[in-house]
Image (cartoon, helix red, strand yellow):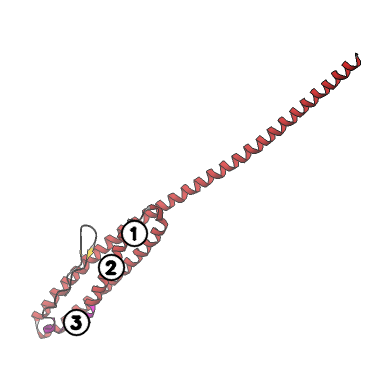
Amino acid sequence: MHEAQEVGSSGDIDVAEPEEATGSAGRGVDPGSMASELRGSASAAGLHYDLEEAREMAKLSTAASASREVRLQKVCDKLRVRLEELKEENIQLEELLSQADARASGGAGEAESLRAELKQLRAAHSRTESALKAKLKAKGEELDKVQIEAEKQRAEAESLKQKLDHLQQTTEELLRERQTSEGRLVTALREQLHEVEQRLDEERAAHQASR
């Protein structure tokens, strides 16, 4: 039977190489049991790949937070599917236990051995399921943090946009006021110039008349 999947301190799930099924032929284990073991190995390999993918995505920069959020959500969905597969395998193990009990009439020792092996398998699956739940919880928390960060960035972008709009509006108002002030100043200067020209004309006319 397969060794249990062990969770290391770094969070990786290592899948051990399968050992030789000692005495399984003598006990009459059917091909369905071997198929269940192969499916368990394939599921463990897929789980290892999904967790590696989640670990790599956790290293991505905040600049890609939106894409990172979507990918983390997909990985969490995959991990949930793996968890359901492990539960189904536990149900299959229970069925194998029932079949072993049915065959136990030919030898109580063989049934006891099968029970011990199935107990070990159930314990291994329980440890793997617990590790998977812990990983799923951690990725869920990380996804929440990414969503919070993305929301914060969206709020900052909206604030900057509002400030830019206000600055543009203020600039336009200042330009309009400047144009109005310049227009008034030009008009006043023209009026003053006209008055000066009139006085000069009057003085010139008076001077010529006094000759």
Residue 1, percent from left and from top: 16, 75
What secondary structure do most residues of the magenta stretch adopt?
A: helix
Q: Amino acid at mark 2?
A: Leu
Camera-near label (1 vs 3) is: 1
Q: CA distance from mark 3 to mark 2?
A: 28 Å
How far apart marks 2 and 1 lie (CA) works out to 15 Å
Q: Is residue 75 left or right of residue 158?
A: left
Kind of residue sitting beneath label 1: Met
**Disc 3 residue type (three-letter):** Gln
Q: Which mark is residue 99?
A: 3
Q: Is residue 74 above or below residue 112?
A: above
Q: How far is disc 1 from disc 3 in space, using C-alphas?
A: 44 Å
Q: Are marks 3 and 2 in contact (CB under 8 Å)?
A: no
Give the residue pinned by disc 2: 47
Considering every residue shown, the one lying at the far top of the view is 210
Residue 210 inside the magenta-drawn segment: no
Circle 3 crowding by C-alpha within 10 Å: few under 14, some 14–19, many from 20: some
- Circle 3 sits in a helix, a strand or a loop, which is it? helix
For mark 1, what is the residue? 57
Mark 1 residue crowding within 10 angstroms, few (<14) / some (14–19) / many (20+): some
Labels 1 and 3: the sequence-earlier one: 1
Mark earlier in primary sequence (3, 2): 2
Contact, mark 1 vs mark 3 (Cβ under 8 Å): no
Q: Nearer the viewer, mark 2 or mark 1?
A: 1
